[in-house]
Image (cartoon, helix red, strand yellow):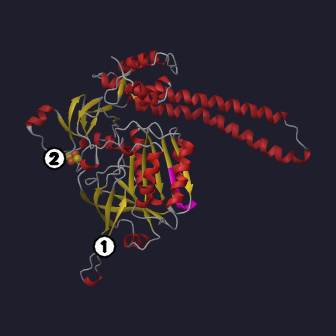
Amino acid sequence: MDRHLSLSQAARLIGVKRGDIQKKIQANKLTVMEGTVVLSDLKKAFPEAAYEDNTMLEKMEKFMQDAVHKMAQSEREGSHVDALTRRLVKINKELADERNRADHMEELIDSMKQKFMELKINTAHEDTFNEIKTWFNTAVKNLDEEKLTTPIVNLEHQIKQFMLPHVRLLPSRHDFISDKSETLLESALRSGLAVDYGCNNGKCGKCKARLLSGQVERTAHQDYVFSESEKSQGYILTCSNTATTDITLETEEAVSADDIPLQTITAKVKKTQTINDNVIVLTLKTPRSQRLRFLAGQHVELSLNTQINENHPEENKQPLIAEYSIASCPCEPANLEFHIPIQTDEPLAKAIRSQLKNNDSFTLSGPHGHFVLDEDSPNSLIFVAWDTGFAPIKSLIEHAMSLEQADTIHLYWMTTKVENHYLDNLCRSWNDALDNFTYTRIMCEAKTGVIAESLMQHIHNEHSHLMNFDLYIAAPGHLNHLLKPLLIAHGVKSQNLHFESTFHGDEITD
Ligand code: FES
């Protein structure tokens, strides 16, 4: 059977940019179906392509056949082979990259050793030189020891992932891996998919899906009663089943903010973390039976539930309410994160700063807003945050990462001073750990003209044109107004621009 590859996978396989593949599609030289291309068509469209490893496809074929026999699973159809192919291509590419990097490092270390031996040292600096030499030799020794263990651990992890059941959702053709320690619903959410659900404990029936192929196993009690018709069609609850083989499920997923219902839930304070004088990161824990369903980038109304004092009614205060963007990914529905600017007269922020305790509770209403990821777009992503506008941007970035869709992700975080990059370490760790992620922090005066000029300068230096980018910008409304025409003039299509007007944070003057 011929393989279907996403555009990113196809580009990686033949070593070209995704834009090159898109050009062939636009020129009708390559057919795309539901975001995928067929391998044989790809070969015809790129006959001259230098495959990263000429034997890779043959090896992959053999590896797949062996794996199919060893796993001894009863059902193997096209979708499962596709999923295996994608994983193998990814593993192969990662292995090749790691090998290249290791080779380069070894060459570098050898030449440094040589250089140390050749250096003629002035006796006045001999102690310093010997100290550096000892340090260098110890560092090389430690590196050698690490090299022995790290790749093996990674490989084990990859193989484990490879052997877990794969789930394909129809009609979206989204895939995810089902961990047997999780329900299907938990695995789908962790993979960033916006599947429907409600109670999360087998009562409401909102998570029901039709099992089209493969086998599942009940992992929790369920009260919901299926009709005879639903039973005969093979419906299951994803919140109380896990996959025991590769499976295909038919279920609806939210594709826009309008598909997510408004909800009201109560959540308890799990943690407050004072990052600096300006920002508290507040984490709320949602009850297992009442998770908040939302899309990355959306916001909710937070209302602090104050104790009712029946003996002294005069002490009963008005509820403290304010809107905040959710800073965490929908793939982590148990814990919701909010970034609260505290240098403000806003009553709720003051209460959070001065009197909040663990286990205090909030009522959450929402979600609201349309600042959400365009999951169907094949474009690379640029995110721009001003100050605590980083909150919705963080949610979007984490969601984009869990979907593994974008070729490249670039974050520009702008603010007035260094301490206002309050999660700088997190952004730098993404930058270090992910090949396709880059982070630029920008400090400038809080004036719209200065900010716009500074941002455009950075973007201009790093991206010659922005035709194939989606931009997501969370900043005060008047700055967004100024940026829109500048970005369009720089080649961004207006439909690829997404703005969120932030509620709080550093004031900007015109
Ligand atoms: S989410 Fe309510 S039954 Fe599954």
Q: Nearer the viewer, residue 253 or 268?
A: 253
Q: Is residue 132 above or below residue 309?
A: above
Query: Nearer the N terminus, badge 1 or badge 2?
Result: 2
In the image as oriented, which residue stretches furthest toward the right?
123
Q: Indicate which label's residue lies in the foreground, 1 or 2.
A: 1
Residue 255 image offset from top left, x and y in percent: 28, 43
Residue 7 image offset from top left, x and y in percent: 40, 29
Question: Mark 2, residues whose alpha carbon is within 10 Å: few (<14), some, or many (≥20)?
Answer: few
Residue at 26% over, 55% down:
290
Amino acid type indicated by mark 2: Asp
- Magenta stretch in the rendered image: 412-421
Looking at the rendered structure, the secondary structure element under dot 1 is: loop
Residue 444 image offset from top left, x and y in percent: 56, 59
Residue 175 is drawn in which quadrant?
top left
Q: Nearer the viewer, residue 291 or 371?
A: 371
Residue 450, can we see it? yes
Q: Give the left or right position of residue 242, taking residue 435 as reference.
A: left
Q: Is residue 24 above or below residue 340?
A: above
Question: Mark 1, residues whose alpha carbon is within 10 Å: few (<14), some, or many (≥20)?
Answer: some
Amino acid type indicated by mark 1: Thr
Residue at 51% over, 53% down:
413
Q: Is residue 415 magenta?
A: yes
Residue where numbered disc 1 is placed: 306
- In three-dimensional space, the C-alpha distance between marks 1 and 2, rounded to whole angstroms, equals 34 Å
Residue where numbered disc 2 is placed: 223
Residue 315 is drawn in which quadrant?
bottom left
